[in-house]
């Protein structure tokens, strides 16, 4: 995977996953709350960090 494809994939994942934060909350739905806490938030953080530290990741994965 080329660096530009990787960045575009990360950007798209970050936007799609971040959209869950703007979805209306489902009160009383514990599965939705667990999904946000343990799935969406870590995925958003990881994709954001990957985009921020792209120069270092290029050296690790694309050398």
Image (spheres, rainbow, N blue to C red):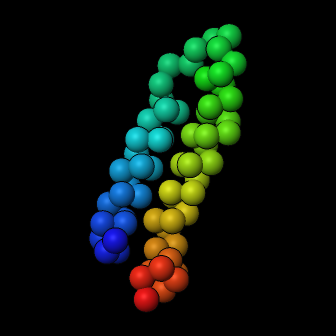
Residue 58 lies, in percent from the top left, at 45, 81
Extreme residue in the bottom direction: 63
Picture residue at 51% right of the left edge, 58% below the top: 48
Name above or below for residue 7 compared with residue 23: below
Write the residue at 52% across / 83% down.
Answer: 60
Q: Position of residue 25 (x, y in %)?
A: 56, 19
Residue at the location (57% across, 57% down)?
46
Side (left or right) of 14 relative to 30: left
User: In percent of the image, x 44 and y 35: which residue is there?
Assistant: 19
Does residue 11 lie above or below 56 as drawn? above
Work out whether 41 lies above or below 28: below
Q: Which residue lies furthest to the front in this view?
A: 1
The number of numbered badges drawn on the structure is 0
Q: What quarter of the picture does the C terminus occupy? A: bottom left
Q: Tell me if residue 17 comes above or below residue 46 in the rendering.
A: above
Q: Report which quarter residue 34 is drawn in.
A: top right
Residue situated in front as seen by the camera: 38 or 45:
38
Which quarter of the figure is the N terminus placed in?
Answer: bottom left
Q: Is residue 63 visible?
A: yes
Can the viewer see residue 55? no
Measuring from the top left, give residue 14's x and y in whole percent: 44, 50
């Amino acid at each position: 995977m080329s660096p530009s494809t990787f960045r575009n994939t990360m950007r798209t994942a970050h936007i799609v996953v971040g959209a869950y934060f703007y979805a209306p909350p489902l009160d009383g739905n514990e599965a939705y709350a667990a999904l946000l806490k343990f799935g969406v938030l870590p995925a958003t953080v990881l994709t954001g960090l990957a985009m921020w530290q792209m120069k270092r990741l290029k050296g690790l994965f694309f050398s």
